[in-house]
Image (spheres, helix red, strand yellow):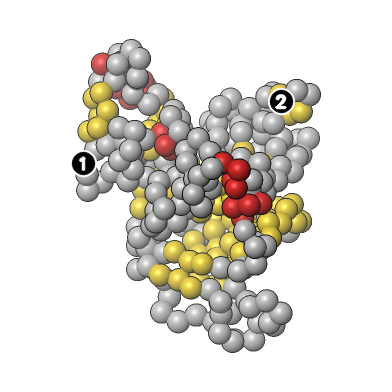
Amino acid sequence: MIEVFFVLSIVAGVAVGQQCSCSPTITTISGTAAPSNILSGDLIFEDNFNNIDLRKWRYLNSLSGGGTNEFQWYVNDSANVFTTEGNLNIRPTLTADVFGESFLTNGRVVIPPSQCTATWNNGCDKQGTPDNIINPIRTGGLETKNTFSFKYGTVEVRAKFPSGDWQRPKIWLKPRRDVYGLFPLSGAIYHPAIRGNRNLLNGNTQVGVQQAASNIQFGPSSSVKNNVFGRFTPKRANGFDDNFRLYKFVWTPTRIEFFIDNISVGVINAGTSLWNQAGFASSGLRN
């Protein structure tokens, strides 16, 4: 059984050089689950997952494959997303186990527009063919796109990640509105993203479950995006699937710092231009 478990909290940010003492905060929030008034250091969002609170979350429901032709079909199914003993469980299953093997090449999936959460890449309506099969993995995801968003603060997630070939679990922070266009144009933060493979080598380096990656992903086009700048990949010989760990990042106007078990693993300073720091100035594309 391959699963990933989560517990989440977000704390309002403190201005640089300011001590937290019930003073105004630099954090801004919005959404139906956001508190009406906040001060520095306030807990502004928390879920201990005694159940799935639909006032906070909505299920991902799409075959878009994450926009990068990934294998998963995000579904609202208690076999794939459920809570036990104060943990959110996300479990992948095989599409063929539900609909049969022939469904992958002959079946059709239609998700009503009111329920579909990602329309691109045949995300809401897909006909399976031998060359473009129905996504073979069913899994789950939750988001707060319409219920809670924030700018600046401290995020803490207690999570245990899975092992298993070609699993790619990640914790994403995506924009509430894709102002500049779909990913990667409007950017995203992830902390962490982990491959589940136990024996995946890049040269002589293990890049599977022994490595956790944290980064800001953005770029002027789907083919020109940041994959190097600000990418931190701490490693553990025993892997990141062995136990629950605390994944935290602190976001201020001047920097983002990533932590694992309260140990800093990387800092991205805003400086004068992330565009130039990421090396996009030579792309010939407009900032």
- Label 2 vs 1, first from the N-terminus: 1
Query: Residue 286, image x and y in percent?
Result: 49, 49
Query: In the image, residue 64 lies at what x, y percent?
Result: 36, 35
- The percent position of residue 196, horizontal first and vertical second, equals 61, 32
Q: Amino acid at mark 1?
A: Pro
| Tag 2–tag 1 contact (CB < 8 Å) | no
Residue 265 position (above or below residue 20): above
Q: Residues within 10 Å of mark 2 (few under 14, many from 20)?
A: few
Q: CA distance from mark 2 to mark 1?
A: 41 Å
Residue 202's mark? 2
The one nearer the camera, 77 or 221, is: 221
170 relative position to 116: left or right: right
Quarter holding residue 51: bottom left
Q: Is residue 115 above or below residue 14?
A: above
Residue pictured at 37% horizontal, 45% vertical: 60
**Residue under pointer 1:** 112
Q: Nearer the viewer, mark 2 or mark 1?
A: 2
Identity of the amino acid at label 2? Asn
Residue drawn 63% across and 78% down? 15
Q: Residues within 10 Å of mark 1 (few under 14, many from 20)?
A: few
Residue 79 in view in this figure: no
Residue at x 75%, y 56% (from the top left corner): 264
Please tell me which residue lies in front, 282 or 142.
Answer: 282
Tag on residue 236? none
**Whether residue 252 is situated above or below residue 135 in the rendered picture:** below
Foreground residue among 225 and 114 = 225
